Amino acid sequence: MSYSATIEINFIDDRYAKLVYASLSPDMNFKYETLAASITLDGNRVICRIDSGDISKLKGVLNSLLRLLKVISDLSAV
């Protein structure tokens, strides 16, 4: 069985979207056995897609992605 998740984040400013994309890109572009992740930038949108053959691995990558987004959000508020 295959599982997937897509997170789309819309920003008011495409400059901020580019910064978030650049921050997440090193961690979100990989393929390893039954787990793959990708990130794309589309104007003011950042789209993260995760595909996995194991629901636990999918959850782990989602949790890591959400934590990274939280850190980026907290740092931008400073």
Image: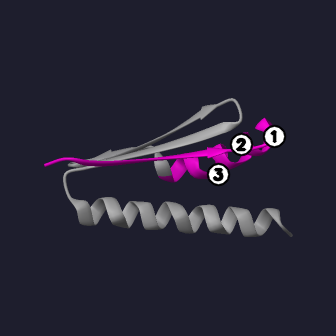
* Type of the residue with mark 3: Ser
Task: Please name the residue that numbered disc 1 is placed on.
Answer: 13
Query: Is 6 included in the stretch rendered in magenta?
Result: yes
In the image, 30 versus 45, the foreground residue is 45
Residue 19 x %, y %? 73, 46
Image quarter in which the C terminus is found: bottom right
| Residue at screen point 81% across, 40% down | 13
Q: Which mark is residue 3?
A: none
Task: Please name the residue that numbered disc 2 is placed on.
Answer: 17
Element type at marker 2? helix
In the image, 45 versus 29, the foreground residue is 45
Q: Which residues are magenta?
A: 1-27
**Mark closest to the chain's N terminus, 2 or 3:** 2
| Residue at screen point 36% across, 67% down | 60
* Type of the residue with mark 1: Asp
How busy is the neighbourhood of tag 3: few (under 14 within 10 Å), some, or many (20 plus)? some
Residue 22, picture quadrant? top right
Residue 72, picture quadrant? bottom right
| Residue at screen point 61% across, 34% down | 41
* Type of the residue with mark 2: Ala
